[in-house]
């Protein structure tokens, strides 16, 4: 329930009450109740407090990664956080790689094309979506390969009801204006356009194909014209960490709603590049920039990781085009397969993983 044009209710129950206000362009949070003083609640509130919102109109959009406030999906996310304080895990975010088809040959691809044209059939994806929504998922991400090459993608988006939001990861290849409009009509929430550099030549080199930077910029415009939220998803390595400001300048220039910073993981084609991960000095540089950055909002996944610990198998789950289920898209450890077992059974198996909540990324310590 909205209190006034600049104040929004995040949670309201006897144990935990929280509201947000947008003051001078930034989100200010206030919380009360017995649970508000617990570490998990303080950490959750810290993620948004003082941050620039993606949008604040009739509803508050904290991030392209969170459902809008108010919404049924956001209420479910709050309940998930409350249950986590009792040790009850929920797969809040599930990434589904619907196809391995991709015109790019990214040097750091975590899921290289096997050449076998693996893909999940529409009926399989619909069934998985129904299962994860029943488990409490509030963010369904359609990934690849390149999901824009999947003809039935709008139909898959339609399967995600108001219990969750849906987004897609795209390099921009095949993300036409028609597809953007069809996805918006189907109910897509946001588009994550991934980048390896803020400069065309270097981005294309990392993607292994000329024209990928132009594809990415075209996808941004097509998504915006269709009325979709846009997130630029920058993958940082030790050799491009100095581009943080350039990434943000690009996000400003194209009018992106958010800039997400991710740290490369040495898996897949990048498995032998251990030296590419960020140093402590690099992380410090990132933290300083995020704290002082102006609009658009910057969401740092490394910072969230340091605050909350590893999300793999605790809040995240990934499904491959072969139906294998991983704790995380960057942690290729098969826990089960959707073609053999219910997702709920596989999710319960993940409770036994030894690294749940670890402050050291299990994929980066190999």
Image (cartoon, rainbow, N blue to C red):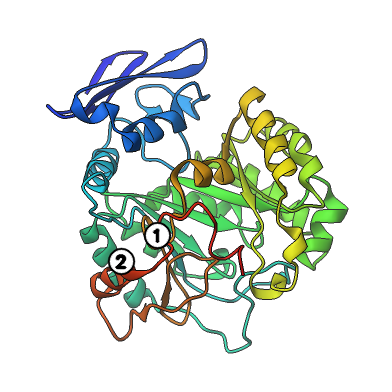
Which of the numbered marks, if any, corresponds to residue 71?
A: none
Badge 1 is on which residue?
Answer: 356
Mark 1 Cα shell of 10 Å, populated few (<14), some (14-19), many (≥20)? some
Q: Residue at x 49, y 26 (%)?
A: 53
**Percent position (x, y) of residue 48?**
45, 29
- When the figure is inspected, residue 292 is found, relative to residue 272, above or below; the finding is above
- Residue 159 appears in the picture as rendered: yes
Quadrant for residue 44, please give it: top left
Q: Residue at x 64, y 52 (%)?
A: 263
Give left or right: position of 276 versus 350. right
| Residue sitting at the far left | 14
- Residue 295 appears in the picture as rendered: no
Quadrant for residue 33, please give it: top left
Give left or right: position of 211 versus 68. right
Badge 2 is on which residue?
Answer: 351
Question: In terms of secondary structure, where does tag 1 sit?
Answer: loop
Q: Residue at x 60, y 76 (%)?
A: 101
| Residue sitting at the far right | 201
| Residue sitting at the far bottom | 116
**Percent position (x, y) of residue 75?**
24, 38
| Distance in Å between CA atoms under marks 1 and 2 | 8 Å
**Percent position (x, y) of residue 213?**
77, 53
N-terminal label among 1 and 2: 2
Quadrant for residue 241, please give it: top right
> Are the residues tagged 1 and 2 within 8 Å (C-beta)?
yes
Q: Nearer the viewer, residue 76 or 356?
A: 356
- When the figure is inspected, residue 145 is found, relative to residue 337, above or below; the finding is above
**Percent position (x, y) of residue 365?**
61, 64
């Amino acid at each position: 329930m909205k209190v006034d044009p600049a104040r929004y209710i995040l949670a309201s129950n006897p144990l935990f009450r929280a509201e947000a206000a947008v003051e001078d362009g930034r989100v200010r949070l206030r919380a009360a109740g017995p649970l508000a003083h617990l570490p998990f609640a303080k950490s959750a509130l810290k993620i948004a407090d003082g941050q620039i919102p993606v949008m604040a109109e009739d509803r508050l959009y904290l991030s392209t990664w969170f459902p809008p406030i108010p919404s049924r999906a956001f209420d479910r996310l709050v309940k998930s956080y409350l249950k986590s304080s009792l040790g009850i895990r929920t797969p809040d975010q599930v990434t589904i790689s619907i196809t391995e088809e991709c015109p790019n040959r990214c040097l750091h691809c975590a899921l290289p094309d096997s050449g076998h044209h693996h893909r999940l059939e529409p009926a399989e994806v619909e069934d998985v979506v129904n299962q994860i929504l029943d488990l409490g998922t509030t963010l369904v991400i359609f990934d690849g390969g390149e999901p824009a090459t999947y003809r039935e993608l709008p139909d898959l988006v339609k399967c995600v009801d108001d219990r969750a939001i849906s987004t897609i990861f795209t390099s921009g290849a095949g993300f036409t204006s028609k597809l953007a409009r069809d996805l918006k009509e189907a109910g897509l929430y946001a588009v994550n356009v991934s980048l390896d550099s803020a400069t065309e030549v270097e981005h294309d080199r990392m993607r292994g194909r000329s024209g990928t930077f132009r594809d990415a910029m075209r996808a941004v415009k097509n998504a915006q014209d269709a009325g979709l939220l846009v997130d630029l998803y920058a993958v940082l390595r030790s050799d491009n960490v100095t581009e943080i400001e350039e990434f943000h300048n690009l996000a400003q220039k194209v009018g992106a709603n958010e800039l997400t910073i991710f740290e490369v993981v040495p898996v897949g084609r990048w498995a032998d590049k251990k030296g590419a991960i960020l140093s402590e000095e690099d992380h410090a540089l990132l933290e300083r920039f995020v704290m002082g950055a102006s609009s658009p909002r910057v969401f740092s996944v490394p910072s969230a990781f340091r605050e909350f610990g590893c999300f793999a198998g605790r809040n995240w789950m990934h499904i491959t085009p072969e139906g294998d289920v991983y704790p995380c898209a960057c942690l290729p450890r098969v826990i089960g397969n959707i073609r053999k077992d219910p997702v709920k059974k596989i999710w319960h198996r993940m409770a036994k993983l030894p690294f749940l909540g670890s402050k050291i990324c299990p994929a980066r310590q190999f």
